[in-house]
Amino acid sequence: MKNVPEAGTYVVGGLVLGAATVLGYWQHYNDNVAAPPRLWLADGPLREKVLPHCSHLLRPFAPTPWAANQHAQTVLGFMRGLTMRNCYTRQLILTVDGATLGLDWFDGCDATDFPIPTSAPVLLVCHGINGGSHEGYAKWVCAAALSHGWRATVLNYRGCNGLPFTAPRGYAATMSHDVFTAVYSIKARYPSAPIVAVGYSLGGLKLTKYVAEADAGLHTPPPGQPQLFAGSGLAAAAVVSSPVSLGLSAMKLSNPTSLSFLYNLAVAYKLRQNIQQHRRDIQAFSRFDVDAALAAWTVGGIEDGGLPASLGFADRQQYYESCSSQDYIPGIQTPTLILLAEDDPFLGIVPDVECSRNPSTLLALTRRGGHVAFLQGAWPLGRSYMDDAVMEFFSATLKHLYGFQSPSVTIPPPSGGAAVATSATQSDGQQSAAVNHTEEAVPVTPWVTDAARAGALAAAAAAG
């Protein structure tokens, strides 16, 4: 009779195999997943004064071990809205062309009796496509700003998040003058407060375009309104998960054989919902072919329904070129962090050449992170790496470039419930022109070598 292994042998063998698998994955995770972001920036104040105080950009980003995949990060990132309740009061602002925008102030921090001085920094959040203040990334970064003793507000675009459609043009990545409207309104309310702004995805495209144009003097108040600030009016900016090149991003998402095509269908579905909601107003105000758009299944098909024409462009390609960031990044003078993930399914191109030549921009490229996610820790639906990195960059810039000290205040935790709109003001800038500062692309490697990174960490330790 042959010897038959006892049951305990199988159990031990299974435990050994399981342990070996876990150890193998952990080795793979530490070697290939968790890594510091690659950095590109030119010599200047950002490199010398700010970066040494940005520990999150100098140390490894360790994504959630069981959700490090790009699609797991991206999908779970959308779910972060479930773990932070809406708590806003809304201020309506009107543009020169009649559009209605909404500034949603987090936790009612614009109230006169809110325990934050009027000179405290104000964070302005620019949301992504089909988004609004209800998005998880918006709520979490607002909560992070509030914990620093800052005010935070989200700019809701035309027709988004319950706003009416009241102008010939809807929201788009080219509408950078709507950002000017928001900055102008904030500066009018808090003239002594430094303003910082962060844009996510499409909001990153819009914010990049605005900062470059405003720094070139292309955004000014309408006749009869005072000039409240020069340039962008921002002390610093951050761009997170921007496609950078909208045309190349659209090509990636248009491949029906790719898993990323599902994102195209999902975005198109939400766009059709928005169009259906505002169907009557869109038909009354614009040349957009609503019926064709509602019959389309992809973002490109909806855009072909008349979006370029409604914005004054000849075709979709001209629209893509106008809102893509490569030509705007060289013109940025406001200190700006650009945080991207290599595995972002929406990323069109990495602007390494442009950022390596501009001392006012700092490009950080992580290995993982997905799209508007950068989830970290065992529980991925809490504070994310992008929240930490953005707020640390803003704090370091305000302190070490401008000498600003954040106020020491006790802030109550965010409360629940969203308030309705109660006020409206009017301000806007003129339609801005394109900024073209392109240079011939050449291969560029990150300036931050291991030795340079160690030196920056040593400098941060000495400063602390």
Image (tube, helix red, strand yellow):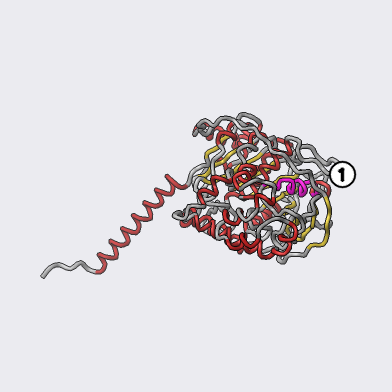
Q: Kindly identify the residue that appears in the image at 48 percent across and 56 percent down.
A: 67
Q: Residue 359 location in percent, x, y?
A: 64, 32
- Residue 26 left/right relative to 153: left
- Residue 159 left/right relative to 422: left
455 inside magenta stretch: no
Could you tell me which quadrant the C terminus lies in?
top right
Q: Classify residue 8 by image quadrant.
A: bottom left
Of 431 and 451, the residue lying toward us: 431
Q: Kindly identify the residue that appears in the image at 56 percent across and 30 percent down.
A: 440
Could you tell me which quadrant the N terminus lies in?
bottom left
From this viewpoint, is residue 268 visible?
A: yes
- Tally of marks: 1
Q: In the figure, 1 relative to 310: above or below?
A: below
Name the main secondary structure of what is drawn in magenta: helix
Q: In the figure, 192 relative to 80: above or below?
A: above
Of 348 and 255, the residue lying toward us: 255
Q: Residue 305 location in percent, x, y?
A: 62, 56
Circle 1 sits on which residue?
A: 225
Q: Residue 58 location in percent, x, y?
A: 55, 40
From this viewpoint, is residue 83 visible?
A: no
Mark 1: secondary structure: loop
177 inside magenta stretch: yes
Q: What are the residue bounds of the magenta stretch? A: 174-185
Residue type, numbered disc 1: Gln
Disc 1 packing (10 Å; few <14; some 14–19; many ≥20):
few
